[in-house]
Amino acid sequence: MSPSTTPSGAVREVGIADIFFSVTDRKGVIKHANQLFVDFAKLDWQTLSGAPHSIIRHPEMPAGVFYAMWSELLAGHPFAGHITNLAADGSAYSVYATVTPLGDDSYLSVRIRPMDEASAEFANGAYAKVAEYETELRQAGIGRRSAAEQGANRLLALISAAGHESVSALQRHTLPREIARLERRAAPIPERPGATGEVGELLTAVGAVNRALTSWTGEQHRLATLSESLRRIGKELRSELESASTGVARLSQLACERVVPKELVEPLAVWTQMQELIGTYIDGLLRVLNELDTNGMEHRFRVALAKLHTRMLAAFAAEIIDNPESETSGRQAAIALSQALRLGLSAMIEQSHSHADLTARSAATITRSVELLAIPRELLLAWRHEIDSVELPRSARRIAEQIADSANRLGAILTELRGIVDKCGEVGLGADPAALRPLIARVEAHTEAL
């Protein structure tokens, strides 16, 4: 395919069972791939090998997406996102792609069918806006690299508007969803019971890794539930504290204006004082909730990436068994996939330990914060009961009811926070990181012996 190839308007759908990869160097030159990559590119392997990966780039893909991708990769982080490619015959095919640094200036990209329609719709809409923006920049005389950088900034703005603080945050959200849907709809990883030799042993070892990762399914569900609760509770806690404080301030102002008796609101001064005293604790609690959420999402991302790489290596081992003479079924390609799996599993294990430590520390912080918050809440409730028999102007009564409502909702939040502590204690149940290490060694040993 030459740079002059234009889209024909035809679209080729990636099947649920289709999983394919390519390995490039730092300059984007293709080094390895599997047969499905070749098939979708509509080119032979001799043409693809040594060619720039941009040979399959769709012209409607904004440069800002690739600028954002390389920003992640050069920082040593994996990238995951929706990409549309262009085959040599002009047909387009959309994939959900992950790109992982291999530590030797090589990069592995694994592609699957996009499984989450909502995520794909958001990505396509955002890309269209960024592409239009980049076109305007280029027409205004802005250079290609600068337009790409500004396109990446525009993409980040759209991502932020959708509630994700960064590209990393977006991919932490989308990859686990994509892999969960893939596992529900796709067939299990391939098995070849009659296969012999090192490649047969390799596939068996990869199957053992996959079974070990399956035990993390419950962990993934617990983390997803925990993350959802953390985000919601953090927002609600801040909102109710602000609502109660606003009500106290408004009622105090009415007392200054002699609309209500001053002695009626004097007990509320204790609320204000306690808010100042525990403000640091509240800020710390909100930081802990955010950190725990971010760390949990990263943990889910790492597990999902490990599952994807396991599926890819199993599919490639099966391809070698089924087509031993295939031009793409090389030992070096298998080594690259094995290397990616090792790096990913090692990162997942390390991240698992980190998350376990964080949850233990977070539980202690949450428990202490709940104890402190309970005191001013009880104060507000007691005050509210005391003024039930007092005659108040309608405006003051509404504010008093607002304060009472906030105090009641704070009670519900404190109950949920106690539940969060229990959920923190469940993190890591049924998932043994140590069990993966010997399995990683088995996979690498059989790959090296190919």
Image (spheres, rainbow, N blue to C red):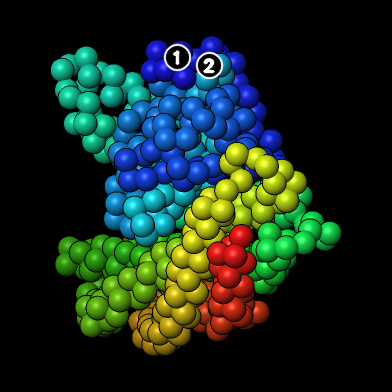
* Residue at 79% in and 58% down: 195
Q: Give how far across and how far down residue 445 sits, in percent.
A: 58, 70
Q: Give how far across and how far down residue 251 sits, in percent.
A: 27, 66
Q: What number of labels is visible?
A: 2
Above or below for 279 versus 159: below
In the drawing, what numbered circle is on residue 5? 1
In the drawing, what numbered circle is on residue 29? none
> Crowdedness of circle 2 by 10 Å Cα count: few (<14), some, many (20+)?
many
> Crowdedness of circle 1 by 10 Å Cα count: few (<14), some, many (20+)?
some
Q: Is residue 204 left or right of residue 162?
A: right
Question: CA gap, disc 2 to disc 1?
Answer: 7 Å
Q: Closer to the camera, 374 or 391?
A: 374
Task: Give the labeled residue for mark 2.
Answer: 90
- Residue 298, image quadrant: bottom left
Q: Give how far across and how far down residue 123 sits, in percent.
A: 46, 35
Circles 2 and 1, Cβ within 8 Å, touching? The answer is yes
Whether residue 170 is visible: no
Residue type at the position of mark 1: Thr
* Residue at 73% in and 51% down: 321
Q: Is residue 72 left or right of residue 12?
A: left
Q: Closer to the camera, 423 or 405?
A: 423
Q: Give how far across and how far down residue 164 sits, in percent.
A: 39, 49
Above or below for 247 versus 164: below
Say which element carries label 2. Answer: loop
The quarter in which the C terminus is drawn is bottom right
Sequence-first disc among 2 and 1: 1
* Residue at 22% in and 19% down: 138
Above or below for 183 versus 245: above
Q: Closer to the camera, 46 or 315?
A: 46
Whether residue 132 is visible: yes
Residue type at the position of mark 2: Gly
Say which element carries label 1. Answer: loop
